Image (cartoon, grey):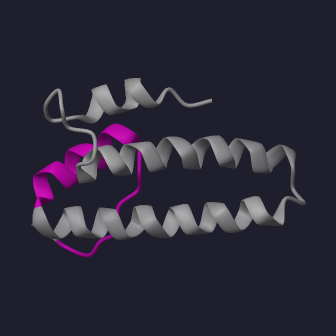
Amino acid sequence: MIDKKQTIQDNAKSDKDTGSTTVQIALLSARISNLSAHLTANKKDKHGQRGLQLMNGQRRRLLKYLERTNYDEYITLTDKLGIRRGQRIVR
């Protein structure tokens, strides 16, 4: 089970920030890790696998947007969440 309020507080820029790109990526990462744990125990859950693929795609798009707009924040967030980065932009 994910603690949504704690995840938002850890990644928010201000008190009222609940929908910024970094918060969305952090929430998706928490949901992805939770669903991955579920799928290791339930290998035949095909609907869950599809949901995991959709969440991974959404997180990938958000990460690509963050990399394009604010590269320093992208680096700190991926290091904090333990997400592997591709070698697209070298700065």
> Residue 81's image quarter?
top left
Q: Quadrant of the C terminus?
A: bottom left
Q: Residue at position x 21%, y 54% from top?
A: 74
Q: Residue at position x 16%, y 49% from top?
A: 73
Q: Which residues are magenta?
A: 70-89
Residue 80, percent across and down? 32, 38
Q: Quadrant of the N terminus?
A: top right
Q: Residue at position x 28%, y 69% from top?
A: 64
Q: Residue at position x 52%, y 63% from top?
A: 56
Left or right, 57 with reference to 39: left
Residue 67, percent across and down? 20, 65
For residue 72: magenta?
Answer: yes
> Residue 45's image quarter?
bottom right
Left or right, 46 with reference to 88: right
Residue lying farthest to the front in this orientation: 16
Residue 61, percent across and down? 36, 70
